[in-house]
Amino acid sequence: MSRRNKKRQRRRLAAEHAKHPALAKFIAGSGHDVPSHVLWFDGGCSRNGYPDARGSWAYLLVDEFGETVDRGCGRVEYDPVTNNVAEWFGLGFGLRACRQYTIRHLEITGDSKLIL
């Protein structure tokens, strides 16, 4: 694909991804190939670090057209539970889900400063 066609494809996909601003910005502004999938993950914990803490995780896998391919969430069954542990669970389960699909390029997005 020529450089000109790649730019056109990135602009077209950016317009289609207006409902996902982070993805649209990435596609429109990058000189890289368009990601075939984007994985968003997150984790959280109430009473972070205390013995009675409860944590949960979630992930969302989206294809290049903004359609949801897979998603998941759950409780963290680990002791002690912290926010960081919950973030790792979200990323881990999200990456595990990605293995069942043919993915050319994967962009991973989250709010964890520890992981990203």
Image: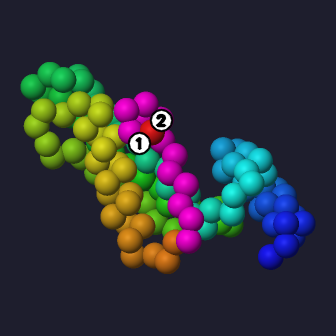
Q: Earlier in the sequence, mark 2 or mark 1?
A: 1
- Colour scheme shown: rainbow
Image-based side of 84 in relation to 36, left or right: left
- Quarter assignment of residue 36: bottom right
Please determine whether, in this image, residue 81 is positioned above or below residue 39. Answer: above
**Mark 2 crowdedness (10 Å alpha carbons): few <14, some 14-19, many ≥20:** few
Residue receiving disc 2: 111
Q: Is residue 93 visible?
A: yes
Q: Residue at x 50, y 55 (%)?
A: 39
Question: Residue 82, how many percent across, how many down?
Answer: 23, 30
Mark 1, secondary structure of its residue: strand
Residue receiving disc 1: 42
**Mark 1 crowdedness (10 Å alpha carbons): few <14, some 14-19, many ≥20:** many
Mark 2, secondary structure of its residue: loop
Q: Residue at x 13, y 33 (%)?
A: 80
The quarter in which the N terminus is drawn is bottom right
The reply to whether the C-beta atoms of the residues labelled 2 and 1 are less than 8 Å apart is yes
Question: Residue 99, how many percent across, how many down?
Answer: 38, 71
Q: Amino acid at mark 2?
A: Asp
Magenta highlight range: 104-115
The quarter in which the C terminus is drawn is top left
Q: CA distance from mark 2 to mark 1?
A: 7 Å
Image-based side of 75 in relation to 69, left or right: left
Question: Residue 35, how many percent across, how many down?
Answer: 62, 62
Please determine whether, in this image, residue 51 is positioned above or below residue 75. Answer: above
Q: Residue at x 38, y 58 (%)?
A: 94
Q: Residue at x 52, y 46 (%)?
A: 109
Q: Main secondary structure of the magenta part?
A: loop
- Quarter assignment of residue 72: bottom left
